[in-house]
Amino acid sequence: MLRSISKSVKPVLRVPLATKRGFSLTIAKMALTPFGMPAMSPTMEEGGIVSWKVKEGDSFSAGDELLEVETDKATISVEAQDDGIMAKIIKHDGEKEIKVGFPIAYLAEPGDNIAELEIPSAEEPVKAPEPAAAAAPKAPKASEPEAAPAKKESTSTPKASQSSGAADQSQVFFPSVSMLLDINHISREEALSKIPATGPKGRILKGDVLAYLGQIPADSNSKIASYIKSKEHLDLSNIELRPKVDSKAAETSPEKVEKKQKEPVKVTHQFVLASSIPKESISKLIAKASKSAEIYAYGTPLYQPSDLIDPIFEELVAPPRNSERFTVSTTIGTLEEPAAAIVDDFDFEPFQESSSSSDVLTTVDVELVCNEKVFDSKARAEKYIERFGDYLKHAESKLAL
């Protein structure tokens, strides 16, 4: 049941009524307030009327739905912000392409007698949608300084022509620009035709409107625009190309690079096997010793047991166990050991056997090349050598028994 109800609800955006007439005790109270086409978004330029929810002569309260406005994206409900009376509806249901701000109705204050009010005809707003005409007494103060900016504009246009240009006719004004134009009663057509645009791609900026009104010097606005334009591209004039390297120098450069290469760290040791070890079992003994030493080197902790050291934390900060620390290479060789001299108690010169009677011992040369990318590779390699030698000694002691 709840699911079916949620589907039947139409999502709309509630926009409060923005145009209202202030309270006053003067005769101006009996004047009607034009209700212009509301802007549902900053980029909205025109819209259509889906339906009016209030008829002419009906009273409404704050929060009541007045009408539904249709844009190119959605259908939005418009609510009243204050209490009032719908005096006259100019644009009816189904009409489209109505410019934002164009009067679509006239509103009266609660308690006004609509019969005594002068309601403009439907043709009057179409001819000139200028709500500023009613505020004519305030216009002389603003009209006098407007004449001066025209002179300033004429004197500064030659300098500003370098950074300003014609305005883009299809542009959408920024909210700050649109607000300034509405406050000063400047239409869109007048702004696009008379205000020089210093923004990118002919866009009118807030500074352009202020310079047009004479509130800021036009020179400063053009200087800022020219400075920004000068920084739009990278200045590569100060960049110098690297001189070309001769072919002979390029041929000799690899040798220099090879000399500079750091040699890897190596750990080497030579083990001498006892003569009691059979030669046919030496290769198997070395293989077992290497396997045992590798397991010991990779699995033994490099720190002393302490209450201040957490093994789990050490495992996290240490390199992975499966990372290669070193590479092992073993070489089996021989070493001749001279025979011991036989001493005769009754002879002053010792008797020595011939050189053919000297013992030949078997040696194992172990070389470990450490991995520089792992910081504990050398320490692990030393553990390997230690374990390798212990295993050989243990094997010799077993054969001796």
Image (spheres, helix red, strand yellow):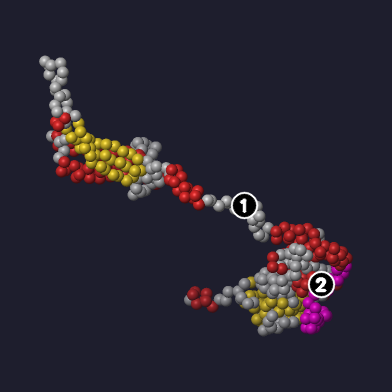
Question: Is 130 contained in the magenta span?
Answer: yes
In the image, 304 versus 260, the foreground residue is 260
Dominant SS type (magenta): helix
In the image, 378 versus 368, the foreground residue is 368
- Kindly identify the amino acid type of the residue bearing the numbered disc 2: Ala
At x 15%, y 40%, the residue is 278
Residue 22 in percent (x, y) is at 78, 68
Q: Is residue 400 above or below residue 73?
A: above
Task: Please tell me in which quadrant of the rendered image residue 341 appears.
Answer: top left
Residue 384 in percent (x, y) is at 29, 40
Helix, strand or loop at label 1? It is loop
Question: Is 310 contained in the magenta span?
Answer: no
Q: Residues within 10 Å of mark 1 (few under 14, many from 20)?
A: few
At x 73%, y 60%, the residue is 226
Q: Residues within 10 Å of mark 2 (few under 14, many from 20)?
A: few
Extreme-left residue of the structure: 346
Q: Is residue 128 visible?
A: yes
What residue is shown with label 2?
A: 132
Q: Which residues are magenta?
A: 113-142
What residue is shown with label 1?
A: 240
Helix, strand or loop at label 2? It is helix
